[in-house]
Amino acid sequence: MQKQITIGIIGAGRIGKLHAENITYHVPGVKIKTVSDIYADSIKDWAVNLGIEKVSSDYRDILNDPGTDAVFICSSTDTHSRFIIEAAKSKKHVFCEKPVDLDVSMIKKVLKEVDKAGVKFQVGFNRRFDHNFKKVHDIVREGKIGVPHIIKITSRDPEPPPLDYVKVSGGIFLDMSIHDFDMARYLSGCEVTEVFAQGAVLVDPAIGDSGDVDTAIITLKFENGTLGVIDNSRKAVYGYDQRVEVFGSKGCVTVSNDTPSTAVLSNEEAVVAEKPKYFFLERYKDSYIEEVISFFDALRYDKETPVTGIDGLKPVIIGLAAKKSLLERRPVKTSEILSE
């Protein structure tokens, strides 16, 4: 019989609640003992319904509890690095939502503290666990398309996030594209060496007024010579557009959008299929479950987590290179970010 793992969750917003519900209903052998949130009173009924023992407004109640094995950090981005370091020093294993931090030097400090503490650490890049993208990854690794030449990633949201969120998100490259930078590394098995980004404000002028863009194309160069192209938009009116293609010397593998069904109506008027699933909670529902199962497997069997701290660092470097490229209107080597 598997040993029970006891965890605490810091932050009970949308993603914190998602993880709590997934763990409660889909991951046996894991107990959520405590949830901490600055609005603790507002989540008490929700916590009771999930069988969570304690709700607290002080995250230290989780870190100071010797009966808690691991902590999920689902709070705002500006708290991530501090909470990770404190959790590591408390000898808690850590699962943290992306990004670890928006500052490279701080991420390096986090990784140093995690390594020193000897705890497990996983970053929440859930798309690696999507059934479609994992299949593409496996096909590429098995050499079935030969040597990769071109990687294309399309990622378009159905609607922009609230403007207040945009202002504190770090910008499209560190908030939205960061998933695609991780996916590019995951599919290629190689590091990005150069980034060239172009962006525009084509969806909402208010996003531009806040200092960001809402539409972008990013080209990537990889260490092994592979080229990459990512296109992003904050608004695709037909739904959540998530597609991938890897073209190589022996073939090509593509992934189309997930739809509610694969039924296609063909008649004399038209051939009609369903639109893509509308938002990330629908599209990536299963991947969120799979990523936490993998984290707990790493704890149980003393394995390396599948998305490490380095995997949390590298997409931030690429994102900062993309921001610099957009600002300076030139290709930027990722080594420039490391030297700053």
Image (cartoon, grey):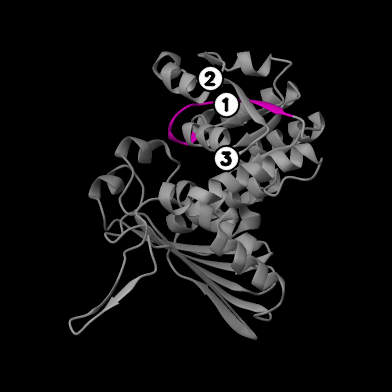
Residue in the picture at 66% in, 56% down: 335
As displayed, is residue 31 above or below residue 190?
above
What's the mark number on residue 9? 1
Q: Which residues are magenta?
A: 4-15
Residue 332 in sight: no
Asked whether residue 13 is drawn in magenta, I would say: yes
Percent x, y for residue 286?
A: 52, 50
Q: Residue at x 68, y 14 (%)?
A: 64
Viewer can see residue 128: yes
Q: Is residue 155 left or right of residue 118?
A: left
Residue 36: mark in rendering: 2
Question: CA gap, disc 2 to disc 1?
Answer: 6 Å
Q: Position of residue 171 (x, y in %)?
A: 42, 46
Give the SS element for disc 2: strand
Q: Is residue 270 left or right of residue 107?
A: left
Q: How many marks?
A: 3
Residue 61 point in image, percent of width and height? 62, 13
Other residues around mark 3 within 10 Å, as few (<14) / some (14–19) / many (≥20):
some
Q: Which mark is residue 26?
A: 3
Disc 3 secondary structure class? helix
Query: Tag 3: residue type?
Result: His
Query: As displayed, is residue 177 above or below residue 150?
Result: above
- The reply to whether dot 2 and dot 1 touch (C-beta < 8 Å) is yes
